Image (cartoon, helix red, strand yellow):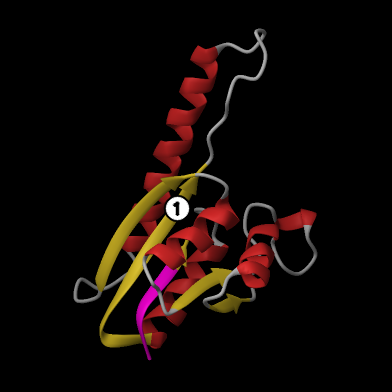
Amino acid sequence: MFDKILLPTDGSEFSEHEVERAIKALSDDGEIIILSVAKKLHANTPFHRKKDFKQMNKKFQREAHESVEKMAAKFDPHVKVRKMVVTGIPSDTIIDVAEKEDVDLIIISASGKSGLRRFFIGSVAENVLKNSERDVLLIHN
């Protein structure tokens, strides 16, 4: 059993399969941290409109919060769940949060929104699996 589990979500249907595994792996008084990483776009040239980028970044933040809320709703009220939205590069941010929060386990789906670009393991999951010093449970879908 694990005392602190990080459960990254991108809002895809695949990430919801992690909930069942997380409940089984969590100790009785353990904590689940649900994390969604919001992208952030930057205007790189004078031709980019900053207003458009601000609107897109707000949309990314809103979608990340919705993903976290959607996954959190799948847990029984007696399960200790903490919700977190962080802006950054998904795989790097997941690894950083896992270290900062001192989690015992990261549970991540093998494929998400990046789906067809990879045959078996999504690019984010693959990077977390290869680069994290924490235990990682990879859920195949």
The x and y percentages for residue 113 are 63, 52
Q: Amino acid at mark 1?
A: Ser
With 120 as the anchor, is 44 left or right in this view? left
Task: Please state the extent of the stretch shown in magenta in the rendering.
Answer: 1-6
Does the magenta stretch mainly form a helix, a strand or a loop?
strand
In-front residue for pair 94/78: 94
Tell me which residue sits at (62%, 58%) in the image: 112
Relative image position of residue 18 (x, y in whole percent):
48, 73
Q: Residues within 10 Å of mark 1 (few under 14, many from 20)?
A: many
Task: Look at the picture and state if 138 lies above or below 84.
Answer: below
116 displayed left or right of 124? right
Q: Please state the horizontal and vertical placement of residue 85, each as a whole percent of the image.
A: 38, 49
Magenta stretch holds residue 86: no
Residue at x 38%, y 54% (from the top left corner): 68
Q: Quadrant of the N terminus?
A: bottom left
Asked whether 138 or 70 is in front, the reply is: 138
For label 1, the SS is: strand
Instruction: List the single residue furthest toward the left.
Output: 78
Answer whether residue 5 is magenta in the image: yes
* Above or below for 25 versus 88: below
The residue positioned farthest toward the top in the image shown: 46
- Give percent across and percent down for residue 106: 49, 73
User: What quarter of the picture does the C terminus occupy?
Assistant: bottom right
Residue position for label 1: 36
**Residue under the point 67% across and 63% down:** 127
